[in-house]
Amino acid sequence: MLVTLAKLTKMSSWPWGLALFLAIISTAQAQLDNENSLLGVYMESGLVQGKRLETQELIQSSIKKASEAMTRGSLGVIFLDTMDDTMSNDTTAVMTVGSCENTHMWAADLAEMGKLHMAITDAGCRRTKYSTSLSIPLVSGSKDVVQLFTDLRTMNTLTWSDITIIHDKSISKLDLGDLVDILTTSTSAAKDVTITMVDLTAAEAASMRLGKLFSSLGPIPGEPQMRQYMVIAARDEIKMIQDLGRAMNLFGSKNQWLFVIPDTHSLRYNMDIYMLSMKDGDNMAFAYNMSEQNPTTPCKNGVTCYVELLIQQYGEELSNALKKELDLYYQVSEEEWVEVKPTPAQRAATIVKAMKMKQKKSQKCGVCTRWGVQAAEVKDAQRFELLNVADWNSMSGLALFDDLFPHITGFFRGRTIPVASLHFPPWQIFEKDATGKVVKYTGLMFSVLEELGSKLNFSEHLATTFPLGSGVQAYHSRDPMCYVQVDQLGRAWGLGILYFIFHPVKKSRHTKGFWWGNSNQFPE
């Protein structure tokens, strides 16, 4: 501005210079609209725990620090006596500390007004769903299991509707009740949920009766054959439960098992030991505690830590958003700016998105509590690996990397499966080059195979050379997954593909290859 004034003094026509100066002042004023923001704060007494005055003082000092650190705009605070208060236009964001029910009611109202909402609420509360809001549950002690499953359920990662919960004393009755409430709450992916409880500490679950108890957990005639089992138990009990379930034929491709292990910790959470008994077709996943056993820094997970952190992050991202808006302002005309400038809701959504990204990396609050989720993935008939599915912490929630049960949702997961065939037009047609090498294969059966591949998520590798004798021959490729039974004309292929289509459970759909042969002569 000083440079501009110096230039104005040199102008021969001072009225024109004055007009230019006033235009610059007007433009600068327009740029500052809505930059001086107010944060409204409302706190319910229950979660503040008699520390309202202390918390208010912390908020005021945090607001001052955040405002001083901003390179664009400023930030102030107003404490609200009730959420029914009429809020001014410059109250661009609201922080609430309150119950779960009220938090979701406020989130809906504030989203409609286009105001940013930061909420601190009860453990076990669903996180707010609006792009202009974020919520942090106050998780401590054993409540981490409850919040983990709240997040799994609301993100439609765990969509079971008929659940058998097998538990020992690793989870308290209170937390178990909260967990059942969460699992029985309808979601878009699970409407009506049925829960069956098996208490391993009960008298009827004594070792002599446990086998009989497990034998009753399988599907009853007339009921759906797919079963879902959730085990919440100490790490030393998991192997016994696996062995008992397998002895009662409760594993296999029709069933899903989720093992929840609360007594692991940051120094001991290896799930490989529970994969030793796995067989082809099993669907197993593990949720395990990775919390710090001996933390070297204080585990801050209370209201004061989250209040201070949220205000700091809000101030930083508000300043960043204003700078980006200013850059855009300079690139367009005044008329265009009216059309393209972000609405209050759009600015709020931008800030919330950036704050959530920061929270995933933050090491300030709730850093001691962490869980991991892994799933068993079948690589081939005898090779199984653990797939990292998710990480979870109380502040940022669930970070998903893959599906909880990868073979339920992804079938073969893009694997290449060897298939053997013969030239037998029009069913199987081989086109060869001058050296006799098969360069292309077509025909009805390959079309059917391609359709199966698109449905079950696999591709095929064709084997075209194998020994032929008289009558019906059995061919086993070097890969134990691939079998074919053919006669000299290859006629048995057609029988085999029809059998596979209508009877797909003879061999596990996870790893076994295709048996193109007589349906009464499967290899064992």
Image: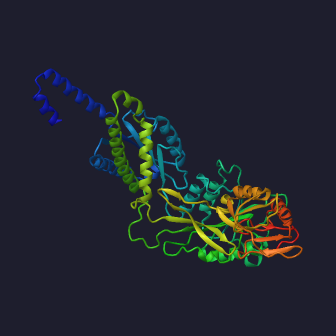
To which quarter of the image does residue 438 belong? Answer: bottom right
With 45 as the anchor, is 78 left or right in this view? left
- The residue shown at (34%, 47%) is 315
To which quarter of the image does residue 326 belong? Answer: top left
313 to 207, vertically: above or below? above
In this picture the colour scheme is rainbow
Q: Can the viewer see residue 380 in this picture?
A: yes
With 511 as the anchor, is 517 left or right in this view? right
Q: 304 or 151, which lies in front? A: 151
x then y, percent, for residue 339? 41, 30
x then y, percent, for residue 337? 37, 31
Q: 341 or 382, which lies in front? A: 382
To which quarter of the image does residue 328 belong? Answer: top left
x then y, percent, for residue 125? 54, 52
Q: Can the viewer see residue 194 in this picture?
A: no
Q: Assign the N terminus to one quadrant of the image.
A: top left
Residue that lies at the very extreme toward the front in this rendered image = 434
- The residue shown at (58%, 55%) is 150
Q: Assign the C terminus to one quadrant of the image.
A: bottom right
Q: 175 or 69, which lies in front? A: 69
x then y, percent, for residue 54? 35, 52
- The residue shown at (44%, 61%) is 366
456 to 199, vertically: above or below? above
Across the whole image, how many numbered discs are drawn on residues? Answer: 0
- The residue shown at (86%, 63%) is 495
